[in-house]
Amino acid sequence: MKKLSAEDESESPARLIDAKIAALGDWRGETLARIRKLIKEACPDVVETVKWRKPSNPAGVPVWEHHGIICTGETYKSAVKLTFPRGAALEDPARLFNASLEGNARRAIDIHEGDAINAAALKALIRAAADLNMAASAATKPRNKPKGA
């Protein structure tokens, strides 16, 4: 296994997300940190990545994946937005989704300063998104044909 250099390690997704949370330094950082913890509790095998790094957003967007993207965590001036790319296919009995409701695939949760987070419902939604990704991943894997077929 290749050992990460100090530079590579400082650019690891976990450190980039840590840095983003620290740089926010307000309720948005606290909210993103809490969401991150809940995601890891709901799906211990989740993989953290950072995508869409560019000059206008050098920290990029935190992304949590398990057999595909579960959700992204964007921060705006007045909200922390969790976007589920396949959210329209998920059951949401607690009605957490409150944004991007018009599309056929995506759904999002906008969390504003002072909003309470329904931890149990969010964790259930995270698990459902991971399960949906796993089912889709299993369905697209090539199957070995039996010998003689």
Image (cartoon, rainbow, N blue to C red):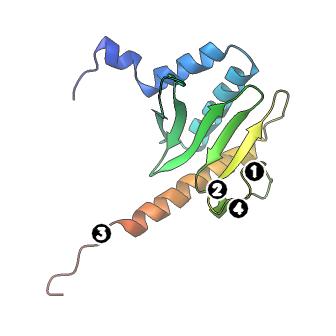
Which sits earlier in the primary sequence, circle 2 or circle 1? 2
Q: Is residue 90 left or right of residue 54?
A: right
Q: Amino acid at mark 2?
A: Gly
Front one among 38 and 51 = 51
Q: Which mark is residue 87?
A: 2
Residue at point 61%, 14% (across, down) = 22
Q: Which residue is mark 1?
A: 97
Which sits earlier in the primary sequence, circle 4 or circle 3? 4
Whether residue 25 is situated above or below residue 128 in the rendered picture: above
Which sits earlier in the primary sequence, circle 4 or circle 1? 4
Whether residue 138 is situated above or below residue 112 in the rendered picture: below
Is disc 2 in contact with disc 1, using a CB cutoff of under 8 Å?
A: yes
Which sits earlier in the primary sequence, circle 2 or circle 3? 2
What secondary structure is found at the residue carrying circle 3? Answer: loop
Separation of residues labelled 3 and 1 (CA atoms): 34 Å
What secondary structure is found at the residue carrying circle 4? Answer: loop
Decide: few, some or many residues near mark 3? Use Cα within 10 Å; few <14, some 14-19, many ≥20.
Answer: few
Separation of residues labelled 2 and 4 (CA atoms): 8 Å
* Residue 126 horizontal/vertical position (percent): 62, 48
Separation of residues labelled 2 and 1 (CA atoms): 8 Å
Decide: few, some or many residues near mark 2? Use Cα within 10 Å; few <14, some 14-19, many ≥20.
Answer: many
Whether residue 48 is situated above or below residue 100 in the rendered picture: above
* Residue 122 horizontal/vertical position (percent): 71, 45
Q: Amino acid at mark 1?
A: Phe
Query: Disc 4 or disc 1, which is closer to the eye?
Result: 1
Give the quarter of the figure containing the C terminus.
bottom left
Q: Which residue is mark 4?
A: 91
